[in-house]
Amino acid sequence: MDSKTIHPVARAAGKIQVQGDKSISHRSIILGALSETPCSVDNFLVAEDTLCTLEAFRQMGIPIERNGTQVHLHGRGLEGLKAPAKPIWCGNSGTSTRLLMGVLTGQPFQVRLEGDESLSRRPMDRVIEPLSKMGAFFLDGMDAHLPAGRQAHLPLTMRGSHTVHPILWKSPVASAQVKSAILLAGLYASGETEVQEPALSRDHTERMFAACGVKLERSGSHVRLFGTAAIHAKYFYVPGDLSSAAFFLAAGLLISEQGVEVEHVGINPTRTGFLDIVQAMGGQITRQKPTEKSGEPVATLVARKSSLKATQVAGDLIPRAIDEFPILAVLATQAAGQTVISDAQELRVKESDRIAKVAQELSKMGARITEKSDGLVIEGPTPLKGAVVDSHGDHRLAMSLAIAALVTEGPTTIQNTECVNTSFPEFWTLLDKICDD
Ligand code: S3P
């Protein structure tokens, strides 16, 4: 079990680049593997989660060369995958699992999917239900149609087919993983597949499909795909991950008079809830050098020390900031007033139960934070003190606690830090860099 001890610092500064976007990296491998044409990817995220997706397609017969963050895929088209010889290991990655299940719905072979303890606790019904309707069979004691109320988890075995039925799916959750799984299966369907979400989740799949020549129509949180499609992926540039940048931007807001600058960050509007919430809290984050790369907006973000005030977060803003609530909770401990996060019950089924674990661990540092069934209530500003805290195997909780530890009185030891490698192995080096600059 790895642990890290972090000492508080009076200031932070510097210019950094964070690793590539996790969501776009997964999708670049999937679309490259299913492409009719060879595909190159630049700035691919080299981390455990995205490497699971890459290895899965190697196992299914796709030649993939990787040289650092550059990847070259020799896609074999939608019908070019072959049955893997052994189970596919999805590690900690919900995105690998659920998006693969979408692709596998169109494959006439059987695959077993396995994952670590945390992933094996996460709900899979949300994809099993629609994909079963599209023609996938889920084995391991589960019928094509799950008995009502039954929770499905990894490990599981599924079998897809050449005959995929188009569906209209009204998803009860705003989830890009659910939407993307259905759209990927819809590539194989002989008709129109439509997904309606209660609020718009990240739209990288839709943007990347369009860039690969796949015909789809979008209106608000509805998307319609016209199968059977062919993928023509040639090149993807993966921007820096805003969800990774958020930790350093938070450090800038808390302690940097000079500013912490993060270059080439993806600022897709379906992902920028964090920036909007910080703005409502009075935090100064400026966007510079806006540009567009591979259909995604990109900018340099600079965060400066700000006096923060509490805010209320709910509704459509939740999916736009879904991965940033642990770090937002840290900021809220330093903001004047009562911050209330509601409608965020999805946080309970992330890499950890982020409502319970964020409250539990920040409380150990003296934060005044309480759980609600669908969110958190945080009182601030509260001086934090060093403590021994635990990540519970959740990468984003580990990194959020590390940023909180910069402003505590006394050192903090974070236990179970190896999980950071799932999304952001360069985190600790960059943290040293902004604290030493
Ligand atoms: C992701 C979607 C989100 C997010 C996850 C990545 C994706 O999950 O939390 O880190 O790449 O589609 P949900 O779809 O479960 O909200």
Image (tube, grey):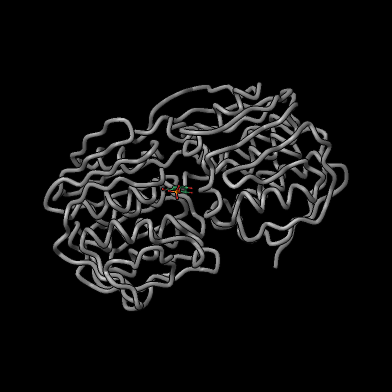
Q: Position of residue 425 (x, y in %)?
A: 59, 54
Is 212 placed left or right of 198 in the picture? left
Tell me: residue 30, above or below residue 211: below
Is 283 placed left or right of 368 in the picture? left
Tell me: residue 113, above or below residue 8: below
Q: Residue at x 74, y 27 (%)?
A: 337
Q: Residue furthest left?
A: 190
Label total for image: 0
Q: Position of residue 124 (x, y in %)?
A: 41, 61
Nearer to the camera, 223 or 2: 223
Q: Residue furthest front?
A: 148
Nearer to the camera, 91 or 358: 358
Q: Residue at x 76, y 31 (%)?
A: 255
Q: Residue furthest right?
A: 410
Write down the quadrant of residue 89 in the picture.
bottom left
Q: Residue at x 67, y 49 (%)?
A: 358
Point out the image quarter for the N terminus. bottom right
Is 195 placed left or right of 246 in the picture? left
Tell me: residue 367, above or below residue 11: below
Q: Position of residue 318 (x, y in %)?
A: 50, 37
Point out the image quarter for the C terminus. top right
Write down the quadrant of residue 341 in the picture.
top right
Q: Position of residue 44 (x, y in %)?
A: 44, 49
Nearer to the camera, 387 or 429: 387
Q: Residue at x 46, y 33 (%)?
A: 316
